[in-house]
Amino acid sequence: MKVVLDTNVLLSGLMYPGGTPGRIVAAWRRAEFDLVMTREQLAEIARVLSYPKIARVLCWDRETIERFLKQIYLRSSMVELPAEHGIAVPADPDDTPILASLVASGAECLVTGDADMLALKDHYPIMTPGEFATRLT
């Protein structure tokens, strides 16, 4: 099963492994689903991992961050977004690439905690982390 994880779910899972997003990240690490992402999302993850709040919680040094980024790159299906994809998240255009990656990849679902994206559940296969975690058990 191919799945797009919104950056907020992935980072929450790394920071708080005991929570629902943490269970999702652990399931990905056990290869229970295939992660789909774009190079742009990978760059966003790299940028966000250096934020002070996240760095304080994770306590990762530069080498650990680089190893994780390499792991996620090698273990994910990278999808290229077409220049014209006709996808939009009206409430937050910055979320559009994540939604477009769902459509372009043909992934089974997008897992997010973002209210703007969840508002589009009637039109796209979008799940909350709790909904997706239930499917994993």
Image (cartoon, rainbow, N blue to C red):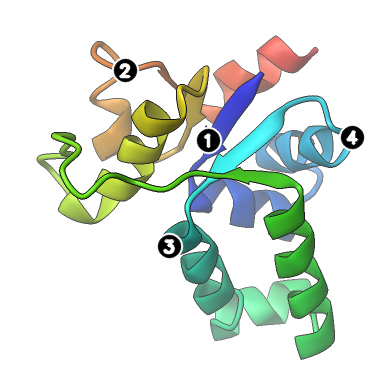
Pick whichever of labels 4 and 2 is earlier in the sequence.
4
Inter-mark Cα distance, 2 to 3 = 21 Å
Quarter of the image where the C terminus is located? top right
In the drawing, does residue 16 fall left or right of residue 37? right
- The kind of residue on which mark 2 rests is Tyr
Dot 4: what SS? Answer: loop
Inter-mark Cα distance, 4 to 1 = 16 Å
Q: Is the Cβ of the residue at disc 2 closer than 8 Å to that at disc 1?
A: no
The quadrant holding residue 74 is bottom right
Say which residue appears at 24% left-offset and 26% top-offset.
119
Residue that numbered label 1 is attached to: 4
43 to 121, vertically: above or below: below
Residue that numbered label 2 is attached to: 124
Pick whichever of labels 2 and 1 is earlier in the sequence.
1
Inter-mark Cα distance, 2 to 1 = 12 Å
- The kind of residue on which mark 3 rests is Glu
Q: Which mark is residue 40?
A: 3
Q: Could you say which is closer to the camera, residue 94 or residue 42?
A: 42
Residue that numbered label 4 is attached to: 30
The quadrant holding residue 67 is bottom right
Pick whichever of labels 2 and 3 is earlier in the sequence.
3
Dot 3: what SS? Answer: helix
Q: Where does residue 125 sit, x and y in percent of width and height?
A: 40, 16
Pick whichever of labels 1 and 3 is earlier in the sequence.
1
Question: How many neighbours does mark 4 have within 10 angstroms: few (below 14), some (14-19), or many (20 or more)?
Answer: few
